[in-house]
Image (cartoon, grey):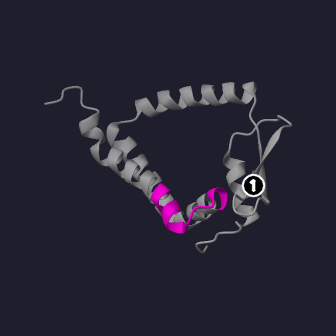
Amino acid sequence: MTDEATSIDPAVIERLLGRAMLGDAPLTRVILAPFTGEPLYSLPLSGAPEVQRAVELARTAQVEWAARSVRERCRIVLAFHDLVLKRRDTALDIVQLETGKARRDALEELLDVLVTARHYARDARRLLRTTRH
């Protein structure tokens, strides 16, 4: 997209929503383009049951994550970094569309994610040591 992102392929939004944890709550929130006020898409709002289920899944995932070696966790975080980098144009389009930010400002947000992921993947062994010198 350009510095004035105005649309995202609806199939991309549907694919992303399909990966989100959505409940059966009838309430939705319409996401508006800040620079036009036009509706972009609707997101289902989560209620208490969806939040409880998300907490349960997070607790299970944490146990599984803790069972992995630090090396394997680093590999996964680096794979996340690489995936975000590979899909950066779509991510930048979405940030621009939802916030009205210029491309360079959207890039700053994306770079925060990339730098943080790389930092923790690179320094995890040192940060997770039980003894520090």
Give 51 or 129, whichever is nearer the viewer.
51
Residue found 61% across the figure and 65% down from its top: 93
**Numbered circles on residues, count:** 1
Residue found 42% across the figure and 30% down from its top: 66
Q: Quadrant of the C terminus?
A: top left
Tell me where the magenta segment starts and ends, as one range. 97-109
Q: Position of residue 128 (x, y in %)?
A: 29, 32
Q: Quadrant of the N terminus?
A: bottom right
- The residue wearing badge 1 is 32
In the displayed structure, does residue 58 sit left or right of residue 65? Answer: right
Residue furthest left in the image:
133
Q: Position of residue 56 (x, y in %)?
A: 62, 25
Give 5 or 128, whichever is nearer the viewer.
5
Residue found 42% across the figure and 47% down from its top: 77
Q: Position of residue 48 (x, y in %)?
A: 73, 25
Which picture quadrant has residue 94?
bottom right
Residue found 56% across the figure and 63% down from its top: 92
In the displayed structure, does residue 56 sit left or right of residue 107? Answer: right
Which picture quadrant has residue 49?
top right
Q: Is residue 26 above or below residue 119?
A: above
Residue furthest bottom in the image:
2
Give 4 or 27, whichever is nearer the viewer.
4
Residue furthest right in the image:
26
Label 1 secondary element:
strand
For label 1, the crowd category at 10 Å Cα-Cα, with few meaning under 14, some 14 to 19 and many 20 or more, is some
Which picture quadrant has residue 103?
bottom right
Asked if the stretch drawn in magenta spans residue 113, the answer is no
Q: Is residue 75 above or below residue 92?
A: above
Q: Position of residue 110 (x, y in %)?
A: 48, 57
Q: Main secondary structure of the magenta part?
A: helix
Q: Amino acid at mark 1?
A: Leu
